[in-house]
Each structure stands twice: as structure tokens, then as C-alpha cells.
Image: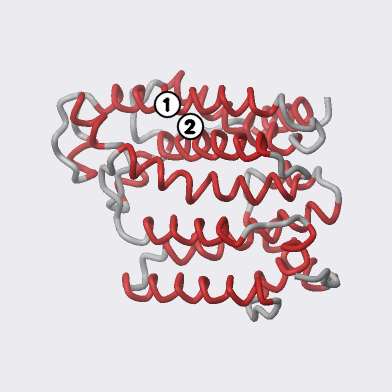
Amino acid sequence: MTQVAIDPQLTAEIAEKVRAAGTSFYSAMRMLQPDRRNAMYAIYAFCREVDDIADDDGISDAARHDGLATWRVEIDHLYQGNPSHMVARALVPYVAMYQLRREDFLAVIDGMEMDAVAIQAPSLAELDLYCDRVASAVGRLSVRAFGTAQAEADVVAHHLGRALQLTNILRDVAEDAGRERLYLPKELLQARGITATEPKVVLRHPAVPQVCRDLAKKADMHFQKAWAAMQLCPKEAMRPARVMGAMYRAIFDQLMRADWRDINTRVSVPKWRKIWIALRYGFL
């Protein structure tokens, strides 16, 4: 794909969509140089578009499937240089500029296909595949926008994506159950004597906190491996990854302190700490 001129108006519209979304990743994206920042805004906007389709409980399963299928076609058009959706059009210049891979965009859509139906107690292998598609694939796109396509950067994406997604799962157990979803893997449930898979039934079992602790060990391992891989990558390119990782590590540490004693209480990180993390890992 040849280099394509950047549309300033479209770029501004995408940036506003990302700002309005209120993502916790916004501060990490803002520290990038303009072209890299705008590439990340477009990548994030794409992820939101397909995620919103998968999470739309107001439409049928068939409609969700059709919506995601439309995005598969749009990704084909993106790599042909003639997409129609504003988010895909915003991505066009950066596909060539940062060598963003078609298979990573498609993997994200594959992950949303998994989420379009109510996931309930997947196997460990299914959960890992899900995390790869909805999080690590996004990481593989992101590290290229950050400024490195080396193999070690994909290792960062592999582990940090899984660490972040498992943290989301561990934070949102009760919220997900309210939407008939249960991401806690069946092997860990069964190891603690839980044979049910219906989310609200599982959450009433007294062993659920221990299952969460077991899954947290896997998240912690991925955090550690992500940090180790970051040390092998250019420091400047890893600044946003460090901030994202530190933000989520703070959430993870809060979860560990709360110890899932009240599964219905959602933990959060205070704003002052988020600012400190952005300064500590983004600039110091």
C-alpha cells in the first residue's frame, strides 16, 4: 500500500471520539508523537466499533454476527485502500506507515465473535485464545504504532495483553455475570469443587474468591513476563506500554488487596494515583 495523505478533519474527529470515550489508555496515547498518537486513536476507535457490536444486547445474535462480518469486509477494503467507514478511512495512512498487519485486525474481530455469544466457563485454552484476540492482537497493532516491530515487542504484546484482559475479567466478575457471562475457566472452577457454569449460580459458591486468586497467579505471571520483555525493547517506544501496564498493575494490586471478599464491589484506582503513574512511567 502506498503512502496516503492524512485528512486533518477526519483525524480530529477520531481524536474527539477517543477523548469522549473516557478510556484509561488516553493518557498513554497522548504522550506519543502526533502521527503515532493519531494511529493509536484510530486503532482504539476500531476496537471500540467492533466491541460495541459484540456488546450490544439490544440486537440479535444474527445482527451482531452481520455487523462483525461487515467489518471483515471493511478490513479487506482497508488493505485495498478504499474503505468506507470513517474509522477505517482514518486507519489507511497508518497501515503502510507502521506496517499494521491485517491478521491482527481480523483477530480482534474474531475475539469479538467469541464475545458476541454469552461466554460461560471457557476452557483455559479457549480463555487464552480469547485474550490473544481481544487484547494481545490489539497490543501487536499498538507496539508498531509505538515505534517498534521487533520480535520482543510482540512478546510484550502477548503477555501484557493477557495481563490486562485477565485483570479486566477479575475486576468485572459480578458485572459480567449480570450479562450472563463468566470468564473464569472451567478447569479452575472444577479444581475448587464448582461444577456449575451458570454465572449467577457460580458466584454464590464460597470457593469463587479462591478461583479468582488462582487466575490472578496467571495474570501476575503475564505482568512479570511483559515487564521483562519491555527491557529488551527501545525505551522510548515502550513508554505507552509501561504506562498502560502500570495503570492495570495498580488495579490488579487493588484486587489482590480486596481479595474478592465482596465480589460485587468494583475496585478502582484514584485519579491522583493515575496521574502519578503517568508521570512515573511516562516521563521519569
* Image position of 236 (left or right of 253): right
Q: Nearer the viewer, mark 2 or mark 1?
A: 1
State the image coordinates of residue 170 (x, y, percent, origin top left): 41, 34
- Residue 135 lies left or right of residue 281; in this view the side is left
User: Element type at marker 1?
Assistant: helix
Query: Residue 75, position in %: x, y?
Result: 58, 70
Image coords of residue 227 (percent x, y) = 63, 25
Q: Residues within 10 Å of mark 2 (few under 14, many from 20)?
A: some
In the image, 204 versus 122, the foreground residue is 122
Seen from the viewer's position, the closer of residues 88 and 61 is: 88
Front in this rendered view, residue 152 or 69: 152
Q: Is residue 183 above or below residue 4?
A: above
Depth check, front residue: 255 or 239: 239
Residue drawn at point x = 58 percent, y = 74 percent: 76
Looking at the picture, does residue 74 appear above or below residue 37? below
Name which residue type carries label 1.
Lys
At 66% from the left and 69% from the top, the residue drawn is: 87
Task: State the residue at coordinates (30%, 49%).
Answer: 181
Pointer 2 or 1: first along the chain: 1
Quadrant of the image for the C terminus? top right
Under circle 2, the secondary element is loop
109 left or right of 11 in image: left
User: Of the numbered discs in the image, which one, if any, rests on residue 218?
Assistant: 1
Q: Which mark identifies residue 267?
A: 2
> For mark 1, does the 10 Å Cα neighbourhood hold few (<14), some (14 to 19), or many (20 or more) residues?
few
Q: Amino acid at mark 2?
A: Val
